Amino acid sequence: LKYDKKVDIWVRQQQFENKFLNN
């Protein structure tokens, strides 16, 4: 499955925020 670049960036942001908030 290939994501749009905007979606990829959004997903990376969400993962980064989740890690930051969880720690």
Image (spheres, helix red, strand yellow):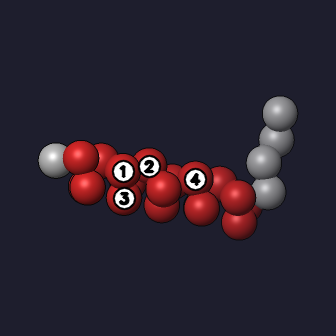
Q: Residue at x 79, y 57 (%)?
A: 4
**Circle nearer the viewer, 4 or 1:** 1
- In the rendered structure, which amino acid carries the disc numbered 3? Glu
Question: Are the residues at dot 3 and dot 4 in contact (C-beta closer than 8 Å)?
Answer: no
- Label 2 to label 4: alpha-carbon separation: 6 Å
Secondary structure found at label 4: helix
Disc on res. 17: 3
* Mark 4–mark 1 distance (CA, rounded to whole Å): 10 Å
Q: Could you tell me which residue is drawn at 58 percent across and 53 percent down?
A: 11
Mark seen at residue 10: none
Measure the alpha-carbon separation of dots 3 and 4. 10 Å
Residue contact at pointers 2 and 1, CB within 8 angstroms: yes
* Disc assigned to residue 15: 2
Q: Are the two marked residues, 1 and 3, in contact with CB atoms closer than 8 angstroms?
A: yes
Q: Split into 4 quadrants, where in the image is the N terminus?
A: top right
Q: What element carries label 1?
A: helix
Whole-Å distance between the Cαs marked 2 and 3?
A: 5 Å
Which residue is label 1 attached to? 18
Structural distance between the alpha carbons of marks 2 and 1: 5 Å
Classify mark 2: residues with Cα within 10 Å, few (<14), some (14-19) or many (20+). Answer: few
The residue under the point 71% across, 66% down is: 6
Q: Three-letter amino acid code at disc 1?
A: Asn
Pointer 2 with pointer 3, Cβ within 8 A: yes
Under circle 3, the secondary element is helix
Query: Looking at the rendered structure, which numbered label has been put on residue 11?
Result: 4
CA–CA distance in space, label 1 to label 3: 4 Å
Q: What percent of the width, then of the height, locates residue 16?
A: 38, 54
Q: Who is closer to the viewer here, 23 or 7?
A: 23
Answer left or right for 9 relative to 1: left
Q: What residue type is labelled 2?
A: Gln
Q: Earlier in the sequence, mark 4 or mark 1?
A: 4
Of the two numbered discs 3 and 4 on the same chain, state the one appearing first in sequence: 4
